[in-house]
């Protein structure tokens, strides 16, 4: 689990990017987790 501050930053980033390409953002995030947790 991420530290609270990191979670907060991520939430802020998600809000910022909501109008941008959300699909790309989540895809990147999933890829990142894929790499980290395999």
Image (tube, rainbow, N blue to C red):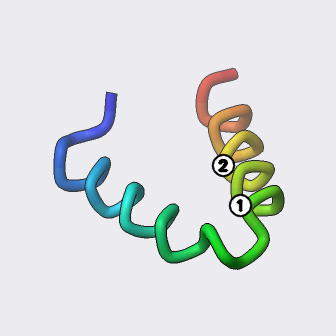
Which image quarter: residue 30? top right
Q: Residue at x 50, y 76 (%)?
A: 16
Point out residue 24 in the picture as x, y percentages from the top left corner.
Answer: 81, 62
Point out residue 31 in the picture as x, y percentages from the top left corner.
Answer: 76, 44
Q: Residue at x 60, y 35 (%)?
A: 36
Whether 3 is drawn above or below 27: the answer is above
Q: Crowding near pointer 1: few (<14 within 10 Å), some, many (20+)?
A: some
In this picture, residue 25 sits left or right of residue 9: right
Farthest-out residue, left: 4
For the N terminus, the image quarter is: top left
Farthest-out residue, front: 19
Point out residue 17 in the picture as x, y percentages from the top left corner.
Answer: 59, 73
Q: Nearer the viewer, residue 15 or 2?
A: 15
Q: Residue at x 78, y 71 (%)?
A: 21
Q: Nearer the viewer, residue 6 or 13?
A: 13
Q: Which residue is mark 1?
A: 25
Q: Which residue is mark 2?
A: 29
Confirm or deny contact between disc 2 and disc 1 (CB under 8 A). yes
For the C terminus, the image quarter is: top right
In this picture, residue 13 sits left or right of residue 7: right
Q: Secondary structure at mark 1?
A: helix
Q: Secondary structure at mark 2?
A: helix
Whether 16 is drawn above or below 32: the answer is below
Q: Residue at x 32, y 63 (%)?
A: 9
Query: How many numbered marks does the figure carry?
Result: 2
Farthest-out residue, top: 38
Point out residue 14 in the picture as x, y percentages from the top left corner.
Answer: 51, 62
Q: CA distance from mark 2 to mark 1?
A: 6 Å
Whether 28 is drawn above or below 32: the answer is below
């Amino acid at each position: 689990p991420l530290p609270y501050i990191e979670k907060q930053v991520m939430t802020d980033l998600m809000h910022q990017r909501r109008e941008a390409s959300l699909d790309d953002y989540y895809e990147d995030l999933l890829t990142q987790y894929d790499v980290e947790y395999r």
